[in-house]
Image (cartoon, grey):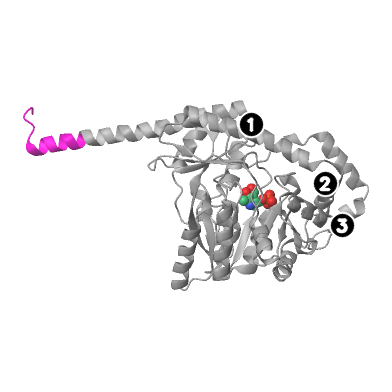
Amino acid sequence: MPLVDLDRFDFLYANRVKGMKSAATRDLMATLSRPGIISLAGGFPDTRTFGEEAFREISGHVATDSAQALQYGPTAGLEGIKDIIVDVMAAEGTRANQEDVFVTTGAQQGLDLVGKVFLDEGDAVLCEGPTYAGALNAFAAYRPRIIHVPMDRAGMIPVAAHEALKKARKQGIRVKFIYTVPNFQNPTGVTLAAHRRRELLEIAREYDLIILEDNPYGMLRFEGESLPSIASVEQEAFGSTDRVVYLGTFSKIFAPGVRLGWVHAQPGILHKINIGKQGADLCSSNLSQMLIHSYFQHADWRSYVKRLTALYKERCDAMLDALAEFMPNEVHWTHPEGGLFVWATLPTYVDATSMLPRAISRNVAYVPGEGFFANGGGKNHMRINFSFVEPDKIRRGIELLSEVIRERMELRSDLERGSQHSSQQASRSAVGNPER
Ligand SMILES: Cc1ncc(COP(=O)(O)O)c(C=O)c1O
């Protein structure tokens, strides 16, 4: 990182920059590409699975209309890609309208645009605690308050969300939306239970809020039954999309390199988002949209997603087995039914942030939990990724990690023994040590 405190233009930067911090995962990227490191830190889908031949084929189709691929496009996206998005959402059980689809430069841009459209300084957003660090980053530019709602194994706890809203109202704080990653959440891997999706929607109706449903991982389920999206629960109950703003992406079912995602929302909201996007990048890349169009039209994308999920299941199993085999009893972790991540909880006295350099020196990396909270917390947690590393390396990585954690735990026991010893000595000398 640059020497931020010595930045000589500090006096010129906008106030909004003060609340913005670089995501730990982005900062780690350079270190993690060092040879020999087993990185359980990234959030990378395994793009190696796609293959050169398949890529050449879809690029060939795009080349036949190179003039359009190289041109600017409409801000809301090309019509053909919107049809594909409708199909993808239908494959996950959400009925989408083509005219309610808006193409973005990754779901990440969707997060930024929703922040831009809804948040004034001091407004509040209810988020899971912990939540996706990239969302905190995107929202931070608009200087909101982040209210974390506790989670358990079934996701955000609606009663706690309700309490938080009641409290915010009493304090005169304006909450604009509830942000949730309902499936295999980043960072915890936890899925929001079906009845909680309905409850959150009811709470949002009671308080007249938006729900921002960010669903990059829903199709990456390798166990259990898939659950209705909050958007589809709303459609079932009220016949149309109203307060649910749904974010989707091609990053996890195809490739993050195309940087393409979408927003599905009602027309009024999309109109504002359109204006926001014009100021951000005019339009998403035609080239990427046409690549995706070519792929989804000519290839069996569903089988590819199945292949990916089978691969991730194998790797997730390898991680869960290794955790069970190597970790001390005091460490706990989640059991995801899909997605890319496991969340591990260490004894409260183990600080995962300060432990990271030691882990890296032992050639294993993870993301410390702290970055997934806006206002402190998460210190004794870590996010570990299973999608990008082969099973034998995952096993070795977890073994190394468990050694580093044990070392920390032993250090603490030694310190405790040491302080007991010195307090015993102190009390002996206080009463006068007869041996002296
Ligand atoms: C929860 C969540 N939302 C959004 C994104 C951004 O995805 P995209 O690549 O579509 O910008 C990610 C990326 O990892 C994510 O985990």
Question: Is residue 355 covered in magenta?
Answer: no
In space, the residues marked 3 and 1 are separated at their CA atoms by 42 Å
Q: CA distance from mark 1 to mark 2?
A: 26 Å
The residue labelled by disc 1 is 314
Residue 355 vertical position relative to residue 245 in the rendered view, above or below: above
Residue at the spot 6% in from the left edge and 30% down from the top edge: 434
What residue is shown with label 3? 71
Q: Position of residue 181 (x, y in %)?
A: 60, 53
Residue at 47% across, 60% down: 159
| Whether residue 336 is situated above or below residue 293 in the rendered picture | above
- Of circles 3 and 2, which is in front? 2
Q: Earlier in the sequence, mark 1 or mark 2?
A: 2
Q: Earlier in the sequence, mark 3 or mark 1?
A: 3
- Crowd class of label 2 (few under 14; some 14 to 19; many from 20; radius 10 Å): some
Q: Amino acid at mark 2?
A: Phe
Q: Which residue is mark 2?
A: 296
The range drawn in magenta is: 422-436
Q: Front-most of 11 and 141?
A: 141
Q: Is residue 72 above or below residue 344?
A: below
Residue drawn 53% across the image and 61% down it: 126
Q: Secondary structure at mark 3?
A: loop
From what the image shows, is residue 4 above or below residue 393? below
| Element carrying mark 2 | helix
Label 1: few (<14), some or many (≥20) within 10 Å? some
Residue 198 visible? yes
Residue 24 position, x and y percent, is 55, 47
> Which of the two discs, 3 and 2, labels the residue nearer the N terminus?
3
